[in-house]
Amino acid sequence: MMKRTIWTVPAVALLLTLSACDAGRGKTHLPPLGGERNETVMPARDVENREGEWTEEAVRERKAVPAPAEAAGTVASEGMEIPAGKAGAASLLLHREGYTACYNTETRVPDWVAWHLTASHTDGPVQRKGISFHEDEDAPLPRVDTYDYSRSGFDRGHMCPAGDNRWSQLAMEQSFLMTNVCPQNHALNSGMWNTIEEQCRAWAERYGDVYIVCGPVFLNQRHKTIGKHKVMVPEAFFKVVLRLKDGPEAIGFICRNSTAKGHKKTDYVNSVDDVERITGIDFFPQLPDDVEQRVERDADMSRW
């Protein structure tokens, strides 16, 4: 059983609410994090090449997805990052230049934000200087605006970070839409969350591309809200990452929305299966089932 330093709360508090864009699973009572898991993990049936290794080409062949072009930045598997299911009644799916957001009109934050980060998108000429957070006119009224966060004690925390959108002026500007933002503890936003964002860019450069999904985690309890529009404050945040090259491999992170010093990013590592159990969201459903089972049950940073 994996050590999870940050989740040391009573088990009764860990029955989690599910988001409206939650892969269509409906409301499910999830086992407490850190408790015994009752589900049976079926052995994965290997997708192999002639040497018996997992390969990017084998995964794409199983899903009939064309191999990527040699040009940097070419989308390898369109939509690979999008979780399964359709938006619920309280949700709005927003397709942007650099990401897709599932925005929850009740919590006033996204349920999840997903994007495909290529090596060519890890840098670029566009700077964030001079770009302000702004309301999303595609969201229904009442809309969250930047003033909801004023003097709240929380940062306007990007889900898809500005640092992943330097390749396009439009993508950079859209990363500052309030539908891509959650109330985030400043120490987390500028510390561990930023460290994980930088790690994702390093992985995209190393492997050519990665697929990322992140969002808030709400415990089944009374939630703090901020601003006149009652923006709900998450208790934690999740991020899951998939690569196909030299793999495939997947990994997850969960960070409490609080100040925590003296921890390494490895202290926040979870398997994607664990993150699915915590959030109720089905990640990377385009993977062949056997591949998905194999990569989502492990949480091993040494493979990255």
Image: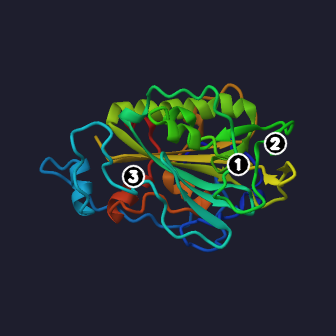
* Alpha carbon separation for disc pair 2 and 3: 41 Å
**Residue 89 in the figure: left or right of residue 298:** right
Residue 266 occupies which quadrant of the picture?
top right
- Residue 5 visible, this angle: no
- Determine which residue is flagged by label 3: 295
Tell me if label 2 and label 1 are in contact, CB under 8 Å. no
User: Where residue 162 sits in the image (x, y, percent)?
Assistant: 56, 35
Q: Amino acid at mark 3?
A: Val
Give the mark nearest the N terminus, 2 or 3: 2
Give the mark nearest the N terminus, 1 or 3: 1
* Alpha carbon separation for disc pair 1 and 3: 37 Å
Q: Residue furthest left?
A: 50
Tell me if label 1 and label 3 are in contact, CB under 8 Å. no
Residue 43 occupies which quadrant of the picture?
bottom left
| Number of the label disc, if any, that sits on residue 279 | none
- Please tell me whether residue 243 is drawn above or below residue 79 in the rendered image: above
Point 44% across, 28% down: residue: 123
- Determine which residue is flagged by label 2: 147
- Please tell me whether residue 105 is drawn above or below residue 172 in the rendered image: below
* Alpha carbon separation for disc pair 2 and 1: 10 Å
- Determine which residue is flagged by label 1: 135
User: Where residue 65 sits in the image (x, y, percent)?
Assistant: 26, 58
Q: Depth check: 142 or 265 in front?
A: 142
**Residue 298 in the figure: left or right of residue 93:** left
- Residue 195 visible, this angle: yes
Q: Amino acid at mark 2?
A: Tyr
At mark 2, the secondary structure is: helix
Point 68% across, 61% down: residue: 104
Point 40% across, 43% down: residue: 210
Residue 265 occupies which quadrant of the picture?
top right
